Image: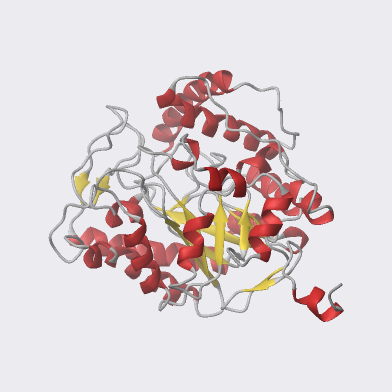
Amino acid sequence: MGSSADTASVTTLASPLTLPSGTTLKNRLAKPAMSEQLGGPAGQYTPQLGLLYSRWAAGGVGLNITGNVMVDSRSIGEPLNVVVEDDRDFAGLERWAQAARGNGAAALVQLNHPGRQTTAGLSELVVAPSAVALDLGPAFPKPRALTEEEIVEIIGRFGESARIVVDAGFDGVQIHGAHGYLVSQFLSPRANLRDDEWGGDPERRRRFLLEVTRAVRSSIGPDKVLSIKLNSADFQRGGFTEDESLAVIEHLDREGVDLLEISGGTYESPAMSNGGLSESTRAREAFFLEFAERVRAVTTVPLMVTGGFRTGAAMVDAIASGATDLIGIARPLALQPELPQELLASPETARSDFELKKIGIKKLDSIADLWWTQHQIQRLGAGKDPDPTYGPRRAVFDALRRDGLNTLRRRRSS
């Protein structure tokens, strides 16, 4: 039997974590960003967001990260995204921060720009590093290549949005550099065909992310949390690779980053909905844990791994082994918002029975799962419990009808 000192040194799900900026998370469980689509027609805060994040905070997470908040009202990723580009809804942001920080949780706002990843008719400006369209048909229009002046402006927008949400009471921000959005587009040799200071080789392709990181840190100061969500890879031929990701992380290690969340994939190749997982990944549950272990060799920044975790036992093993510092639990929290409490109370036996929702049409399976999850999130935002009987086919039908109405409302309010 080990000594009490040995026992005390073991890291558990309940262990606090102090980030480099000084913020202490009360435990190792985090709610990552998920799309809520609960903003108002002009991108403002709504009481539904307060109810939703209060529920997740009460459920026991140590870290509460919002869904992607847009930095430019002219370019949004989905109908009813929240937009923060000035102080006009400061009181609403204060209420959101208070709700998300309930029960001792820390709270971050995920800041994002969709670039080319926006559907037809949704954004006034469809822009990207280069004029390269998504390979997803006419629903995603071909973007216009950004000018250098516009690139500099967007960098400034990230910094200004970060300042506003921190002033409103959030503990910090997360820059969304994954899943095929604008930062990820700059990193990808498939999407970024530039041959200037912003593209042409890996060093110039990562410049946009580094400049955004510096702008955000300058805006929020040294004592607020700066997190970055980054793809391990795009999982596309000719795309952003693991080796390129490791090189980016080496550079981020020098930029005062507090937390690095590892993810992967894009709209064109959604990693967490694809089949063909390796046996080691199935056994350890997490999609990106093996890559996280490679990351440890190139950075001292605390790590968060999101995607695939279902059992408390696997989470305990991932934390105790040192492979990751935080466990990100996303879609299971849409169905079981109190799951963190169960994991903390009975870490070796608690589990989520959540499974990816599919309709049997490969090109629609990932979007069906997304829309099913959004339905559960919106129930929580309405003060209701999740509905496990709600089917993915119905989710697709309801979302198509709802998104059409929301897009129309947004056009009328603009």
Q: Quadrant of the N terminus?
A: bottom right
Residue 34 seen by the camera? no
Viewer-side residue, 208 vs 261: 261
Which residue is painted at 36% across and 45% down in the image? 235
Is residue 167 shown above or below 307?
A: below
- 29 to the left or right of 34: right
For the residue pair 17 and 281, the one nearer the viewer reads as 281
Relative vertical location of residue 47 with respect to residue 147 in this rendering, above or below: above
Q: Quadrant of the C terminus?
A: top left
Q: Position of residue 260 (x, y in %)?
A: 50, 64
Scheme of image coloration:
secondary structure
Residue 179, compared with residue 162, is above or below; it is above
Q: Residue furthest front?
A: 1
Q: Determine the residue positioned at 51% across, 59% down.
A: 261
Judge from the rendering whether residue 267 lies leftward or rightward of residue 316; answer left or right: left
> Could you say where residue 108 lies in the image, as x and y percent from the top left?
57, 61
Q: In which image quadrant can residue 24 be found?
A: bottom right
Q: From the viewer's perspective, is residue 402 above or below residue 28?
A: above
> Residue 362: horizontal and vertical position, in percent?
43, 24
Count of numbered tags: 0
Residue placed most toward the observer, 413 or 385: 385
Residue 102, position in %: x, y? 74, 59
Q: Taking the image as drawn, is residue 229 in sight?
A: yes
Q: Residue furthest left?
A: 195
Q: Residue at x 43, y 73 (%)?
A: 298
